[in-house]
Every structure is written in structure tokens, then in C-alpha cells.
Amino acid sequence: MMFTNSSHRDDESGQPRADAYRDRHPWYALDHAALIYPALLSDTMSASYRIQATLDAPIEVPLLQAALDAIRPRFPYFQIELRKGFFWFFFERNTVRNAVIGDSRFPMQKSAVGAQGGYLYRVRAHANHIALEVCHILTDGYGALIFFRTLLAEYYRLQGICTAYDATVFDPRGTPEPTEWEDSFSRYADPGAPKPHRGPRAWHLPGMPLPLHTMRITTGVLSLSATLSKAKEYGATLTVFLAAVFLAALQDVQDADPASQGRRHRRTIRLQLPANLRGFFPSSTLRNFSLFALPEIDTRLGHYGLEEIITRIRAIMALSFDAKELKRTITRNVMTAKHPVIRVIPLPIKNILMRMIYRTHGENMYTSLSTNVGPARMPSSFADRIKRIDVVLPSTPGLKTVAGTVSHGDALSITFGSVIERNDLERLFFRRLVRTGLRVKVESNHSGRDIKEPNHAILQ
């Protein structure tokens, strides 16, 4: 089913206008990573994440709105709303103006996703902060960062600072390529491939929930060069080093958990580490195209030191991010959705099945999630006007505390999002970094205990 609208005009250069491409494609299906999210959306599950920039000057909101209006036609696959069909959710073109809104102490709450005229992303501004909040139904971090860079480039262009356009910063007047909204999962599925192995249920963090629509955000800022040097001392990449510290901190929490005392009461601690699949399979899609490794430690075997955890993560990631292994998971997800029986199940029943699958094959399988976006790669034309970039991930009732890492210049930002009252995981994580000799400055949208280590940074 496809609706078309052939009425469009070329621009003055004779090239098809970007919004003309949108007009010809006002409807399309969700990608295979996004299919499960609509069934899960609720007051406690937003499925949104956030990329935010702290600038060196207050935001000119009218200028930011003009920049957003200017780039929207270049990203027609972002200008959509989520709609219900009889068998599946689908995307439909949204013609309502997407306005810049004020920020909130508690990000990614009360989203308009699913509402008539509601977008799957929103741009927020306050003081010298710009934030892009994106629902994972729409795109992954790769696509969101391209949109965010392009928005910032246009904002500064309107201030008189021009940026060269390339594959990471789009020309707002350019024409979208069909490959930009390709479902790359379908492209690389390998029918007949065996299903991936499913491990045992993972241990989950204890803790009482915070009030509804609140979320504790705790950000630690380190020197990127110093942290890279420290990771090298341990023979690890930055991603492996930080994941190992994370698992070690989770082990500290489990060791102190009264319900986990005694070997038979312990469960495996398993961390979800997402990765961009565009580095493994050629793709220029700006939709979702990422999978994850699942490094774990089984503390029934004893206590794991940091070096042991690093060794395990390196080995597990090497096996997980093998193209053949990745295709196993890609194929399972794609072929499950294409199964003749699944396809004809009405949406209300399908939603119930989706929620059951998510509980058994999703949150129950992971203790927490940590993603390293890597360098934000802001263009040199305005990079020095950005003081810091942060990534905030959504916490859920199952994955109660999660972390996102990104760097800009020499500022390495590690941000925890949590929906539980206790903050010992965050404190233990940053304390472990400080004990390795790193300096960490910590800030939070909640008041809490300061973390201090002698002769090192005060975590404030």
C-alpha cells in the first residue's frame, strides 16, 4: 500500500526539491529494529534517547527554530508520525510544524509519540543548551547525530558561520537518497541461518522506583586523552575499559545486595554494548542499524578483578561482532517479522506478544546497558563554540540504570540515567575510575552524596 502525490516543483537550480521527494513517499513501514518499540511505549517506557550540546553562548531560540525549519525538508523520513494499522504500526507524513520547545529537568518524559500530529523527535533549548530527543522507533545514534550536526551547522550558518557539507553534515537544500531510509536489516538477512544462542536470565539492580516521569541524570566528565592512556595501560580500547569498569561496579552492587548473598542466589551480570553495524555491512541508512554484544560475568564462579573482566569483554566482543554471528541475529529478527502467521495476527494481539517477547528475550536478559557513541565529530567551523556533548539513554523498570558515553574535543562525557532512588552504581563506577588515577567531575539533576577520593578530583 503506497499513497503518492506527483505534484511538486523543482528549485531554481532545476534539481528536485527535497520536500518533493517526501511528497512522493508519505508512507512507509518501520524497520526491523523498531517494530517492537510501539508495543512497549508507556508512562514508564519512552524508548527515547537524548543528544545535547552545551554552547559557549545562550541559545537564540528564533534562530534555532529557523534552522530546524530549514533542515526539515532534507530529512523527510524524520517528518513523520506513528500510526496504527490493522496488522502493524506504520509511519505517515506529518505536516504539522515541529516547534522548538523549552527544556525540562527530567528529559525524555511525556513524549507526543503516537499522538495525532506527534513527532518522534523534538528539539529543546534552555540557556546555552540545545538537546535533540529521539525515539528509537525513528533512528539510532548514527542517524540522530547527523541530524543534530546538520541542525547546529544551519544554526551557526544563520549567525554567519559557514560549514562545508559532507556525509556527516547534510546540505539542507540537497535531495534525499532512497538509501537513507533503507531497512538495512532486511538487506543483510540470511534466510536459513541458525538462531543466536540465548543465555540465562540476568541479575537486575535492586531499588525502589523514583516518582513517575522523573529520572536522575548523573554526568561524569573526564579528560579523553587521559582516559585513553589509562585504557591503553590495561591493554584495552576505551569501550572495553569503560565496559569493564561498569561490570566491576555492578559486581560491587551485587556483592552488597542481601538478596544475592550465597552462590546459589546469584545470577549472571550481563551488559548490553550496542555497536553501529555500518562498520560491518555497507549501509548509508539513517534508520536503525545497530546490534549489540553481551559481555557477562558469572559471579557464582568467584570474584572478578578488572583485568579478568577486560579479558572476557575483549573475547566476547571479538566473537559477537563477527559478520556471520551478526547475521544470525539480523536474520532471526527479520524472519520472525516476516513469518506468515505473525504477519496476519491483528495488531492488538501482536502487541501482547511483542511485550511478552521483550520481557523474555529483552530486559530479562540484561543487567544494564552502556553505549559508547565515540567522538561527536563536530565540524571545525563551530567545534570550539561547543563546550560539551552528552548522550542520555532511557531507563526502564527493567534496565533501571544505564549509561551513555560520547566525547567532544578532550571532554569525555559519561552520563547515567536512572529511575531508582539508590545511586550506588553511579558512585561506585566513578569511584573506580578515580582510583585508577583519573580525574572526574560529576554533576546531577538530583541532590545526593558527593563522592570524594584523596588526591583526586572531587566528584561534585
Image (tube, rainbow, N blue to C red):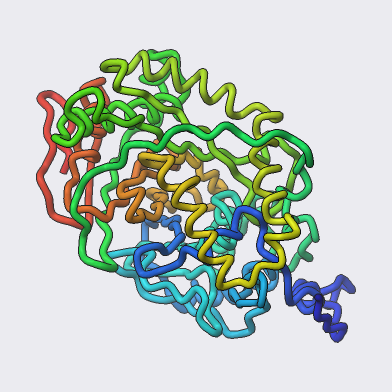
Q: Which of 381 and 120 is in front in this view?
A: 120
For the point 18% across and 54% down, the residue is 208
Which quadrant of the figure has residue 103? bottom left
Q: Position of residue 216 (x, y in %)?
A: 25, 55
Q: In this view, does 348 lie above or below 278?
A: below
Position of 367 with respect to 151 (left or right) is left
Any part of residue 448 in sight: yes
Question: Quarter of the image containing the C terminus?
Answer: top left
Any part of residue 405 in sight: no
For the point 50% across and 42% down, the residue is 373
Question: Quarter of the image containing the N terminus?
Answer: bottom right
Q: Nearer the viewer, residue 377 or 246?
A: 246
For the point 78% across and 47% down, the residue is 187
Q: In this view, does 9 lie above or below 173?
A: below
Which quadrant of the figure has residue 130? bottom left
Q: Where is residue 441 in the image (x, y as percent from the top left)?
A: 23, 40
* Outermost right residue: 14
Q: In this view, does 62 lie above or below 137?
A: below
Q: Which of 258 and 229 is in front in this view?
A: 258
Q: Where is residue 304 in the image (x, y as percent from the top left)?
A: 30, 17
Q: Nearer the viewer, residue 441 or 303?
A: 303
Q: Where is residue 339 in the image (x, y as percent from the top left)?
A: 73, 55
Position of 373 with respect to 1 (left or right) is left
For the point 40% across and 20% down, the residue is 231
Q: In this view, does 250 lie above or below 153?
A: above
Position of 114 with respect to 249 (left or right) is right
Which quadrant of the figure has residue 163? bottom right
